[in-house]
Image: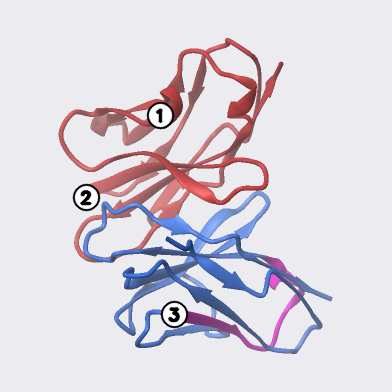
Amino acid sequence: KAGVTQTPRYLIKTRGQQVTLSCSPISGHRSVSWYQQTPGQGLQFLFEYFSETQRNKGNFPGRFSGRQFSNSRSEMNVSTLELGDSALYLCASSLGTGESEKLFFGSGTQLSVL
Amino acid sequence: AQSVSQHNHHVILSEAASLELGCNYSYGGTVNLFWYVQYPGQHLQLLLKYFSGDPLVKGIKGFEAEFIKSKFSFNLRKPSVQWSDTAEYFCAVTPLGGTYKYIFGTGTRLKVLA
């Protein structure tokens, strides 16, 4: 069974640009959640999608948005990039039917904003 | 605000030493509790979880954790660490009630000296 796939693996952007990251969950998983990982901050929850609906979101500005498609693939968009957005962005998938479920993580997209 | 605290940011141990990593959370309601581990070059993966029942839970590779509700703690332990336990460890909680909001701690980097 293929794992969670995130593309691209690395991205370099400049301030003010926008970026779209993609996440393909494990087959059969309907929940996708996104996290920003930075040294010293750990993983910070961005949002969670289930069956194309956002069920919750973290405390990030509106520049961070996401969506989920009918095949459960998810995209995350960051507009008007700032230097502080440089981070590893992780997505995780699960069945989405219970909050005690195990999350399966991808390798992440390393975003560098110059 | 809901939060997870991991007080040890960096831990260095010699092989065969005992390990205890602290995790405290702030939330007044019922939660699910998790420890995830990220080995060098690998994805984040679940080490163990607690959602109900016996507060002492056992995970993979000889790890265990104890949920102490009165202390809002979920400390991770291992009686004798190995060089291969070198990794970053993250504590996480999800408040029950359909929030699907995953709150992670800042992580603890463990280095085990051979």
Q: Name the residue type under label 2.
A: Gly
Q: B62 left or right of B55?
A: right
Per the rendered image, the range of residues in magenta is A74-87
Picture coordinates of residue B75, whole percent (x, y): 40, 29
- For image coordinates 42% across by 60% down, the residue present is A1
Closest to the camera, between mark 1 and mark 2, is: 1
- Choose the circle earlier in sequence order: 1 or 2: 2
- For image coordinates 64% across by 88% down, the residue present is A79
- For image coordinates 22% across by 56% down, the residue present is B96
The red-tinted chain is: B
Tell me the residue that label 1 is attached to. B75
Q: Name the residue type under label 1.
A: Asn
Tell me the residue that label 3 is attached to. A73
Indicate yes or no whether the magenta region holds residue A78. yes
Q: B62 left or right of A14?
A: left
Q: Are marks 1 and 3 on the same chain?
A: no
Q: Residues within 10 Å of mark 3 (few under 14, many from 20)?
A: many
State the CA–CA distance, disc 3 to disc 2: 32 Å
Q: Quadrant of residue B66?
A: top left
Closest to the camera, between mark 3 and mark 2, is: 3
Tell me the residue that label 2 is attached to. B29
A80 shown above or below A45 = below
Q: Name the residue type under label 3.
A: Arg
Q: B27 left or right of B3?
A: left
> Is residue A7 or residue A46 the one in the foreground?
A7
Question: At numbered mark 3, what does the secondary structure look like: helix, strand or loop?
Answer: loop
Q: Colour of chain A?
A: blue
Indicate yes or no whether the magenta region holds residue A72. no
State the CA–CA distance, disc 1 to disc 3: 35 Å
Question: At numbered mark 2, what does the secondary structure look like: helix, strand or loop?
Answer: loop
